[in-house]
Image (cartoon, rainbow, N blue to C red):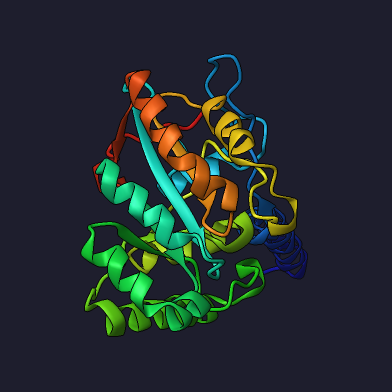
Amino acid sequence: MPRLLKLILCITLAFMVEAAASEAAPVMASSVQPYHFGFKKSKNGELPSIAQEGFMNILQANGAIFLGDTEQKELYLTFDNGYENGYTGKVLDVLKAKKVPAAFFVTGHFVQDQPELLRRMSEEGHIIGNHSWSHPDMTTLSPEQIRTELDKVREAVAGVTGQQAMSFVRPPRGIFSGRVLETCKQLGYTNVFWSAAYRDWETDRQQGAAHAYQQVMSQLHPGAVILLHSVSRDNAEALSSIIDDARKQGYNFKSLNDLNVKIYR
């Protein structure tokens, strides 16, 4: 082969490799780019939205839950349990009295510290979800480290309750990436976010049951996945009224196991 032709082929090949690398780079970057989950809240009856947040396609590609069927007046009640502050028992009392299912996303600290509450959740038919062992920013972890975080919770929960499988996970602090969601999905989990929430986790800034009630009720919408923190005194005191008055508006409380239609908007 003439030397000039070889040179042309080498240059062409170099350009092709460079172009392929430049095309692949954004895809790889987007898979590890961290996001903090946020959404446009429901207001005046309008549905919430994540369309402007820049990650809707990532949730959709990984089958994550943000919003249920907006054609049905159904609500999905979820709690994050990083640690116990004395109110989870009251929350469970209300749920039992009202016959409402919920999902509790627990950390390793909660599992080790509160085995009786964990057993009660299981015995009373609630979902126990995975919130990681040490509540890290999972975007900083490798897939193997993520597996370890989740496996430790699953195994510890099984040791307390006998429940061998866990189906739902919530990334700690709502921080995630495409890689995090994909890793969790490959491990058999459905990633669960939320479409109704408020700043309720600050235990030194509780503002009373009326405040919790107003914050939740003002965001109700069909298919709502409600996030509450069980460390909140306000939530525990308002929960009964929230359930009663949501039902008066025609809403039904459902289990995440019944959520078959996922909406992304």
User: Residue sitting at 65 percent across and 57 percent down?
Assistant: 20
State the residue in front, 55 or 125.
125
Is 36 on the left-hand or right-hand side of 45? right
User: In the rendering, at what x and y percent does residue 243 appear?
Assistant: 39, 34
Is 248 on the left-hand or right-hand side of 175? left
Can residue 205 be seen here? The reply is: yes
User: Residue sitting at 51 percent across and 58 percent down?
Assistant: 80
User: Residue sitting at 37 percent across and 40 percent down?
Assistant: 76
Can residue 68 be seen here? The reply is: no
Image quadrant in which you'd find residue 98: top left
Examine the rendered structure and indicate whether residue 53 appears above or below residue 186.
above
State the residue in front, 191 or 160.
160
Q: The N terminus appears in which quarter of the rendering? A: bottom right
User: In the rendering, at what x and y percent does residue 91 appear?
Assistant: 42, 53
User: In the rendering, at what x and y percent does residue 52 appear?
Assistant: 67, 31
Examine the rendered structure and indicate whether residue 137 appears above or below residue 177.
below
User: Residue sitting at 27 percent across and 46 percent down?
Assistant: 97
User: In the rendering, at what x and y percent does residue 14 appear?
Assistant: 73, 64
State the residue in front, 96 or 170.
96
